[in-house]
Each structure stands twice: as structure tokens, then as C-alpha cells.
Image (cartoon, coloured by chain):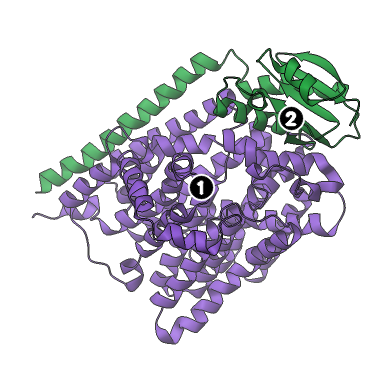
Amino acid sequence: MILKSFVVFLPALIAGFGFVHLFWKNDHLAALALKVFLGIGLGLGITSCFYFLRLLLFPGQGGYLLIEVIFLTLVIVALFSQKRIFFNFSLIPAALTRIQVLSGLALIFIGAVALYFLVIYARVAPHGDYDAQAIWNLRARFIYRLGNAWENAFSALINRNFHMDYPLLIPLSVVGGWNTLGGEVLRVPTMLSMLFLFGMAGIMYSVIAYLRTSSQAAIATLILLATPGLLIFSTFQTADIPLTYFFLASVSLFILASHENNRNLLFLAGVMAGLAAWTKNEGIPFVVLMIICTILVFDIRQTRASLVSLLTGLTLPLLIIILFKADISVNNDLFSNNGFFEIISKLVTPSRYIQILTYLISELIHLGNWPISIIAVLLVYGRIMGVRAPRSLTEGVLWFIPLSQFVIYMLIYVITPHDLEWHLNYSMSRLLIHLFPLALLSFFLFVNTPETVLRSTA
Amino acid sequence: MRNLRGMAIISLILFSIFVAATNGLAAHAKWNEDSQTIDPISKWEKRVKPVLDHIPSTVTELGYLADWDIPDSGYDLIDQDNEYTLTQYSLAPRIVQPGLDHEWIIGNFTNTKFRDWLDQNLSSYKLTEIGFGIYVIHRTLP
């Protein structure tokens, strides 16, 4: 069933790859690899957007596979018309250094262990974690089992604890998989979790390999895939890992857009940011941050055109989100029962900040459940390796996105209508994991590469 | 400095390999522990799904009562909340709402005082035991 669950999504994955390839004319090997991994989220995300439209417009629930095939066909036709169907890359192996061999082998080992970890958990915990049963897979079950009456999955009678306002990229991908396979196959959400985890690792590797070196890319990725907390969250079948994937994809494309002065990449960054918002509500502030970054980073003469590219990419996912929010009339739990004066009163209560800060310090020390603080380890590593000066404004403001998203998360805790202790306990480790891959990417783009330091004689 | 940097790189890689190996061993131990048993979610589904055999298929909303409704009954709030969530997860698309405002109610009790409590709060009802502390309560008078 695990293979069938993969095959169900294969047309979307290929279409996603083709879509990225269409907009980014680069046949460098690392760029092609990056396109494959970007294609995972883009293919699944765009398909889920069109599947939602299909549910709104026509009765029944079938047609997920048809949407995938139409998407793939359109992409292939576009590739043919643009004469982009063939790749022009060379596979002549370069001489590998010892550090490249070592880091590469380590990455293969750690990747295999991560896969083993996910497969074992898929068998012993096939329904995922509490949030999957309370939110993500529950929503998929409601929609799938209700058939033509799928909109009742957002009935106001359903307990608010089940967060009916959360967006649908993941539940609709699960429903699409189930409809295609003809039943509620437990491996479908598992496969989605695997695709997003390894897609994220692939993006991390290929973007750093493209912009820096292969051993730097391998080290960043092996840290990502060795992170116990990240692996555990991947087994939960929640939307956190897909959201993290879209954050990383969008920021990577943003950096490349600036690096290559290519507005098509900015368009793709917009698509990925929009899909982040279609995955989880935390993606909405991320969209705003991406818009701010585009205004800040690009030359004043280019700002308008750059902004248009980003916003064009955002259009489809944002349109779908607006349709979804208009179609269901459930308020977000953070802002209902939380009046303006209540929020102001919380914002000026110092004890809340102290409580959050105390909890945050403990969470940062244990970030990702590493046995020794990974932040301390990386700080020492960075100190020894040295850092390179940012070569562009984009690199200079690279930390702005994860830091701003982090500040937004902390502000949400300040104003939360829930019991603060409970809310911190329930979600902070997850929210920090959203930002961990972005922080790793920023770190390894700044720190000197093994190739650089081992070549130097200092 | 070059040697120190080389050592830093090797140490970081070895540390990551060590942590990854620990992850692999933890997963292996989990497999040895749990592979022979049914996962708790599937187990709960098996327990609770038979209630549907006793409820008309046209009923789309169900009430839900548990130990948390009975005054002075010792209960673990997290367990109670998990069981309620799992009941909704198992019975979707039927909507399961806490409380006794519905004609058909699912009872999930370990506390033996629940019958007295039901007698005090419902004027007339029929109780069907499903097993494992799960009951179907049919209110026969509003």
C-alpha cells in the first residue's frame, strides 16, 4: 500500500517538477535536483487548490487523479511549446575530496536511518499523533465520508476544539488519495509526511549545493535529518512539516531569485508562500513577510516588477484561501473571545513576557530534542569555521524572515485567549521546528564551507 | 587553525551520525515493543464503532457523556479529552458533542456511579452496554 500511496501522487509530483522547470531555465545538476524537490510541494499544493475548486463547483468527490493528469498534460504541452522538454546537463563526475566523500556517505546513512524511523512509526502509529486525529485526518475523514455533503465537514455544530478554520492542503490531498485508491488507506497521510520531510531535506541539500558546495550542503542536510524532534513531528501526520517545507521552499526560491536576478523564481517563491498559507494559518503572516522582504531587498527600480511577480505567484493559493474562508463561517480560536481591550491588556502585562521567555529558553536549549543543545554546537562550529560576509542584500536580510516569523509566534503567545502555560506546552516546540530548517539554511549559507577552510593555509 | 577546523567538521558529522544512530535504535526498540500489539487508536475505534449498530443511520449528531460529567469522580482530564477526540475521530462524519442534549448519547464510563447520575439527570432512557465501559444511551422522553 505504501507504493500505491506514492503512485497516486506521482503525476502531481512530475507536474510540479515540470512547472518549476518551465519557469527556471537552468540545467545545472544541483538546479535540476532542486526542481525535483520543489516539485513535490508545488505539485501537491496546486493539485489540492484545483481539487478544492472542483469540490465547490461539481457534485461528488472523484477526479483527483484527473486533475493531476490534466495538470501534468498542461505542463508537458507548455514544456514542448517552450522547447524545454530536454535537459542539457553533463554527468561527468568531478574529482571528489575526502570531506565530500565522508559527508556524502554520512548523509546517505542518516537519510536511510530517517527513512527507517518513518517506516517503523508508520506501522506502530498509523493514525499519527493527537493533532492528526483531532484536526488533519479528522477533517479528511469528515470530507471523504460525507461524499456530496462534504461542506458539512465545517458545520458549526462540530466542537471548536477541532479547529474547523484550518486550511485544507493536507486534508484534501489525503481525501484525493483515498478517492483514487477507493478507500481510507492509512498509508496515504504517511506517504505525504514522508514526501514533505524528504522534499524539505532535498531542498536544503540542493540549494546549498547550488549556492555553496556539496559538502556544506551535506552537513546542513545531515543535521536536519538527524534532528530527533523533526523526525518525530514527521510521524505525527500533521501540517507542521509540510508548512516547514513551504517556508524553506519559498525562502530558497527568494534567495535564488535575487542571486540570479530572475523574476520567474520570485513568482515561484510567491506560489510556495501562498501554499504555506493554504497549509496552515501560520503561513498567512509568512506571506506578509515575503512581501515586505521583496520590497526591502530588490532595487527601487525593480521593486514594482518584483512585487508583481511575487503577488502573481500568490494569486491562486490566496484566491483558494479566500474562497475557503468565505465558504465556512468559523472564526479562528485565537481571535474569537479575545476582544481588543483584552489583547491590549495582555500586551502590557510583563508577567506574560517573563513566562514566555522562561519557557522559550528551555525550549531553545532542547531544540529538536538533540542530546546537547544544537544551537550551542552550531555556535561553536560557526566560531571555529568563521563566517563569510554577505554578498548581497538578500543574504544580509536572510535572517529577517525566520526572526520576524519567530517574533510573530511569540506575540501570538502574548495575546492568546488560551491558558498561557497550556498553550506554550502544547505548541512551542512545534513552532520552533517550523523555523529550524530556515535557521539552518541561513547558518550554512553564512558559515565558511569545508572546501574553503581546508584549502586555506591560515 | 586548519586542523582545528578539520576536527570541527569531522566532530559535527560524527555527532550527527551518533544522534541518527540513536534515533534508529529508538525506532527499532519501538518496533520490538509495539509491533505485536494493535495501536491504541485502532483499538479505540474497534471499541467504539459498534455503537453505530444500535443507533439509526439517519442520526447525524450524538451526545457524549464521560467520567468528566459526573461530579466528584476522579479522572485524568487529558485521558478524558483524548478519548472524546478519538470517539469523534472514529465516528466521523457523525458529530459528537459533549453533553446530554441529544436523543442518542454515547457514554464512556469507568466510574460506577454513572447510573445514579443518569437517573438524576434523564427522566427516561434506555441503556445498552457495548463493552469496555462504552454505552449507548437512548433518551426515550425529552
Disc 2 secondary structure class: strand
Disc 1 secondary structure class: helix
Residue under the image location 70 percent in, 33 percent down: B89
- Residue B73, compared with residue A266, is above or below; it is above
Q: Which chain letter goes with mark 1?
A: A
Q: Position of residue A214 (x, y in %)?
A: 34, 51
For chain B, what colour was chosen? green
- Residue A356, compared with residue A395, is above or below; it is above
Q: Position of residue A442 (x, y in %)?
A: 34, 57
Quarter of the image for residue A171 reads top right
Which quadrant holds the C terminus of chain B? top right
For chain A, what colour was chosen? purple
Going by the image, does B139 lie left or right of A294? right
Frontmost residue, A49 versus B85:
B85
Residue under the image location 48 percent in, 20 percent down: B30
Q: Residues within 10 Å of mark 1 (few under 14, many from 20)?
A: many
Which residue corresponds to mark 1? Answer: A199
Q: Which mark is residue A288?
A: none
Counting every numbered tag in the picture gives 2
Going by the image, does A72 lie left or right of A252? right
Which residue corresponds to mark 2? Answer: B64
Residue under the image location 73 percent in, 38 percent down: A141
Frontmost residue, A361 versus A439:
A361
- Residue A190, compared with residue A431, is above or below; it is above
Q: Position of residue A285 (x, y in %)?
A: 51, 62
Going by the image, does B141 lie left or right of A455? right
Q: Amino acid at mark 1?
A: Gly
Q: Using the numbered discs, state the Cα–Cα distance from disc 1 to disc 2 in whole angstroms.
A: 41 Å
Q: Which chain letter goes with mark 2?
A: B
Regarding residue B87, the answer to whether it shows in the image is yes
